[in-house]
Image: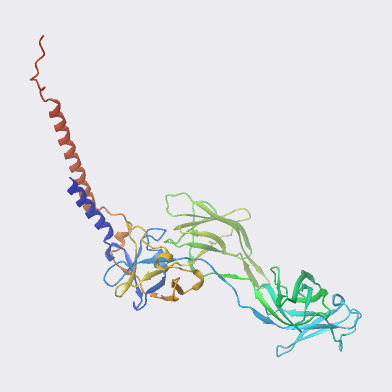
Amino acid sequence: MKFLTATLCMVLSGNALAELLTDYAWGVPVDASGTEALYQVVLPQSVYQGVTRSDLGDVRVFNGAGEVVPYAWRPRRALQMTPESTTLTLFPLKMGAGGRIENASIHVQRGADGAVTVDVTGGDGKTAAGATVVSAYLLDLQNINLPLQALELGWEPAQDFAGRLRIDGSDDLSYWTTVVAGAPLVNLEVGGQQLQQRRVELPRGNPKYLRLAWVEANSPHGMPVLTTVRAEFYPNLVEPPRVWMEISATRGKSPGDYEFGTRGHMPVDRVRVQLPESNTIAQVEILSRNDAAQKWQLVTRGIAYRLRQSGAEIVSPDFSVNGVSDRHWLLRVDQRGGGIGTGVPVLQVGWIPHHVVFAARGNPPFQLVYGNRDAKPAAFPIDTLIPAYRDDLAARLPLAPTGAVQVVNVNAAATLSQASLGGESRLHAVTDWKRISLWGILVAGVLLLGGMAWRLAAQLGKAPAPDGGKDDQA
């Protein structure tokens, strides 16, 4: 019996581990030479429409010898990118004696060659031409499209001083709002140690102009002249590009219901509703389900509109959803106000495609295969396939965290046209008669042993007593 059980376990485990190309319905050849260690492939739309699992657990990568190679899913996260700092032009604002920069009028002119000229007019209406006293500085930020995080200032002469700088912001040079009330700037030397504070933090915002002026000073030599300013920017998130698919609608069972189908398990995170008629506003709900037998589940709700204004159309922004991979979708339109008219809407779904990274073990051609109802997830964690993985290194990923720095290039590989392997039969559950027969043998063996044990117990119960079965006599 032990031999029977061991043999059965070996057969079952070998049957589960030995995967063939024909176990999968579809395959996409991968254009990778195999001369590098790692390659990454962007999943085409056909994969999402051919898998049987929403978690992509039935995806594999095979080499030319028909062997499964190690692979992992690359995280689909937005990358935080910090723009490089840049040097800005300082425009000194000069006023006459006793003049206050708060009362002055500032005018900025741009020439045809892009040159900028700044004119200052005092509160009495007189220009400050010929004035030598610098009362403040102007920064022109109209060509800066990123929000400033900080300013790093340079000055001369480098003499000891400690002061505070006020920074005001404006969009029209007429109305100013205080951005920083009094940022400390310091340049001191004590006992051979240099103490400097050159950096001024800014709240998030994007004014067109900044005005810098000293509000408090403590220096026997007077305040220095600002000569340079370098702008630092807030980090911004850069999302990978999305793939969009347009889906036609069919009217649902109830008025205002419109059904759509993706025919796949795309990880949808954006939904775009295109209304059929202009000047339409409607309250809508977006629902989804993976199977026609399931109940609809609410995904999101909001306002969809399409308005015409000044000869141009204004449409509602995309609806943000949380990576829904269901195959069936429903747009439910509130019928108050007439709904959306007589036409039918068009739905566009967008998603950030997965990147599969695989080790080019063995010889090409490599093939991305999918579509197997019985397959289980087999992907490695990304930091197991690529130790010390970091998102911000993009295609260049560190392999060795200690010793000499080693870098592995993850090369991009293109996918070709989809080809049939095991066919659509692999998309449906199949009866594994071999497995059933083996389990039948095991059950029969257990029943046989049970019967033998029962017969043996019955025979032991009928055995005669040791003394021949006679009673003791006095």
Extreme bottom residue here? 113
Observer able to see residue 242: no
Extreme left residue here? 468
Residue at x 65% of width, y 75% of height: 232
**Way the structure is coloured:** rainbow
Left or right: residue 139 versus residue 305 is: right
Q: Position of residue 48 (x, y in %)?
A: 41, 64
Q: Position of residue 340 (x, y in %)?
A: 59, 59
Q: Where is 115 relative to 12, above or below?
A: below
Left or right: residue 311 versus residue 369 is: right
Q: Where is 328 relative to 100, above or below?
A: above
- Of the 4 image quadrants, the one containing the C terminus is top left
Left or right: residue 172 versus residue 244 is: right
Observer able to see residue 272: yes
Q: Position of residue 90 (x, y in %)?
A: 74, 82
- Of the 4 image quadrants, the one containing the N terminus is top left
Extreme front residue here? 191
The number of discs equals 0
Q: Position of residue 71 (x, y in %)?
A: 37, 66
Residue at x 31% of width, y 61% of height: 424
Q: Where is 121 relative to 240, above or below?
A: below
Please tell me in which quadrant of the rendered image residue 63 appears.
Answer: bottom left
Left or right: residue 43 versus residue 101 is: left
Residue at x 14% of width, y 28% of height: 460
Q: Nearer the viewer, residue 98 or 39?
A: 98
Q: Nearer the viewer, residue 415 or 139?
A: 139
